[in-house]
Image (cartoon, grey):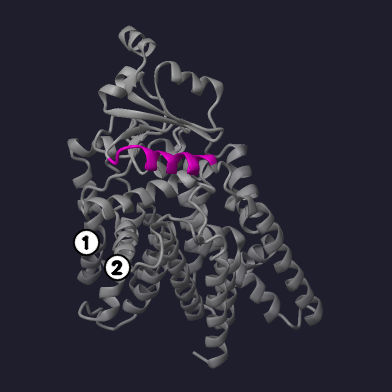
Amino acid sequence: MKKIEFFALALILAGAFAVRLYHFSWPVADWHSWRQSDTSAVSRNFVKNGFDLLRPKFEDLSIAVSLTDNPQGYRFVEFPIYNAAQAGLFILFDRFTLEEWGRLITIFSCLTSIVFLYLLVKKYINSRTGLIAAFFFAFVPYNVYFGRTILPDQSMVAAVLGGTYFFSNWIERPKLSILNFQFLITVIFIAAAFLLRPYALFFTLPLIYLVWHQFGFGFLKKWQLWLFLILVTMPLGLWRIWINQKEFLPGIARSDWLFNGNHIRFKGAFFQWLFADRIGRLILGYWGLPFFVLGILRKINKKEGWLFFYFIISSLAYMTVLATGNIQHDYYQVLIIPTLAIFFGKGLDLILEKKDVFNRWVSYLTITVGVIFMLAFGWFAVRDYYSIQHPDIILAGEAVDALTPKDAKVIAPYGADTTFLYYTNRQGWPVFDRSYKAFKKAGASYIAFADPSQEDLNNEKLFKLVIITPKYAIFDMTKPTAQGLIEQAKD
């Protein structure tokens, strides 16, 4: 790597790290706080109760996860690699909070992705395109925000990019040796990607293309490739077999709705939401779209082949199969950011390359204005993501933590959003999914309200009041009033 390239990449990495520190210490009550809280809750349970990676738990005991009572608080989604790292670093180093360690892991994952994205694009196109793609990944406001959230998605992206890069190096070796660093690190990266988020399976198409490009039908005779396939898929397969035991079923989040639960696939709204709103507005900030399109139209070189178009196919397949999930949650598009970055880089580099076609100074001006506007409009789209929309849930949760026994189970209703429950630091229910009598039978001992309404305050007629302020109210369900006993008898 030339010194100027190293300096440029180091500058991008430093800038990427710096911008992701924005509101670094703020509470986890911003955009998609429910998913971040669920992730961090698993890590907190490791800190409090020990590292049982095969039985991850969180605070939510409601039926919202699986439509079945979850009295143990099991949380079976991705294998808890991310959570183990978050909890482990928090225990080892007494410098940051648990939530800040989660954000640091995500930030580090982004920096890792930037390096591998640069190396991959440089290898198959050129270093300038690699640096442009790295710049896009580092500074697009959408990816800046989701590049510091407590979610495993960015770690999965880093694992996919790292695995793809090392896999491309490994299969180019004459004897396909399995006794070397390239093979070992590739297996680790790809297997980890599948465990972090099984959606990584969609992004194996570039690997399949590389195999076909290198061996054709000869790949069938390469036992090393079959061994690789077994090694990278076995951990995910074993994890899925483990969690599908009857005991754990209440902790498996419903996922069937992610595919096409609202029947939106290929309807007008599907294209509007994903391609116009999410990709065009939210990520590319309108002005990045022409560069991306130019990247698609750019003539491919011999070494590159169709490799990067398989990133597009993977992204389209992922968004199409998980249609409702991608529409419902904008953080799902984190997985397609490398694809957008690669073709954005190819398009912008095309303009810089064609000096005999485009006027040099007009090109520079167009690129400068386009990139500035892309970043500005992207920031305008995501700036409210950082906002704490309902700070009272934090105050209410901290009050519950201070005023109730550590083993209390709490009803903390917040529309099934677990953020409020997370800040109580108690197991319980984030939604009214049963009667008070059923709640008490399940072990509920307190009920708390953030920003209580008059209807909420009427619980004073049923249970002893612990505290009431304009911001929150807490009631002791173990001490019902006379009217409360009558109401429970009716249930």
**Residue 245's spot in the image, x, y percent?**
18, 39
Q: Is residue 135 left or right of residue 71?
A: right
> Is 401 within the magenta?
yes
**Residue 370's spot in the image, x, y percent?**
73, 67
Q: Quadrant of residue 484?
A: top left
Residue 262 seen by the camera: no
Question: Residue lying farthest bottom?
Answer: 3
Residue at the image point whose x is 61% and y is 61% from the top: 141
**Residue 424's spot in the image, x, y percent?**
39, 41
Where disc 2 sits, the SS reads helix
Residue 5 seen by the camera: yes
Q: Nearer the viewer, residue 381 or 2?
A: 381
Residue at the image point whose x is 34% and y is 24% from the top: 477
C-alpha separation, residue under disc 2 versus residue under disc 1: 34 Å
**Residue 349's spot in the image, x, y percent?**
64, 76
> Is 160 within the magenta?
no
In this picture, which residue range is highlighted in magenta?
392-406
Residue mark closest to the camera, 2 vs 1: 2
How many other residues sit within 10 Å of disc 2, few (<14), some (14-19) or many (≥20)?
few
Which label belongs to residue 92?
2
Q: How many marks?
A: 2
Q: Is residue 36 left or right of residue 268?
A: left
Where disc 1 sits, the SS reads helix
Which label belongs to residue 230?
1
User: Which three-letter amino acid code belongs to the residue tagged 1?
Assistant: Ile
User: Which three-letter amino acid code belongs to the residue tagged 2?
Assistant: Leu
Q: Nearer the viewer, residue 344 or 418?
A: 418
Q: Nearer the viewer, residue 143 or 317?
A: 143
Decide: marks 2, 1 in contact (CB < 8 A)? no
